[in-house]
Image (spheres, grey):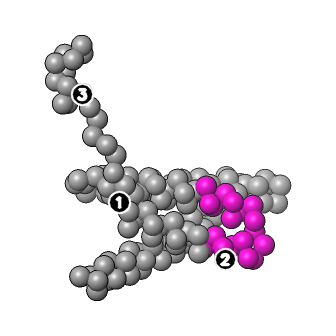
Amino acid sequence: MNTTGVPAAEAQAAPRRLDRPVLVANLVSGAMWLLLLASLGSWVLALMGAVYVAAASVFLAAVYGRESLTVRQEALAWATPWLVAVALWTWVGSRIEGGDSSWALNLWFGVVIATGCYLAWQLLALAGRQLMEWKARMRR
């Protein structure tokens, strides 16, 4: 027992584990999409996206690094980065044309653009994870 009355083994938090394939695939996928965006001249959006991709990738890797997930936890793990993307794109939409558009139009813009970007990012990351898994099986 320690001074808090909790057995010492329980007082130590288990180390956080990141799911490496999820982290690597999300970072690579995000980098590829952001390079495309930057090559089109949208450096500011690419920099904002880089911060988002890094944070969301670590978040998803931490969630999938857990021993087990409930259906609710998995749904929230997917919805959370998407909702952040919606908020970011809604904010970007509100800055277009000096912020004269309505909040509903900005939200619609955020939902449509964020959903497309999120799906493209995650589909490319899925392909990356599948490729990593296939290469690992080939080495065995």
Q: Secondary structure at mark 1?
A: loop
Return the residue nearer the eye: 33 or 89: 33
Measured Cα–Cα span from mark 1 to mark 3: 24 Å
Q: Amino acid at mark 2?
A: Leu
Verify whether residue 40 appears in magenta. yes
20 lies above or below 8: below
The residue at 38%/67% (across/down) is 21
Q: Secondary structure at mark 3?
A: helix
Q: Which residue carries the number 3 mark?
A: 11
Identify the mark nearer the N-term, 2 or 1. Answer: 1
Q: Are marks 2 and 1 in contact (CB under 8 Å)?
A: no
Q: Which residue carries the number 1 mark?
A: 19
Query: In this rendering, would 140 be left or right of 113?
Result: left
Q: Secondary structure at mark 2?
A: helix
Would residue 96 be seen by someone viewing this image from the given angle? yes
**Residue projecting furthest to the right:** 98
Magenta-colored span: 33-51
34 lies above or below 56: below
Measured Cα–Cα span from mark 2 to mark 1: 26 Å
Measured Cα–Cα span from mark 2 to mark 3: 47 Å
Answer few, some or many: residues within 10 Å of disc 1's Cα (few below 14, many 20 plus, some between 14 and 19): some
- The circle drawn on residue 36 is 2
86 lies above or below 6: below
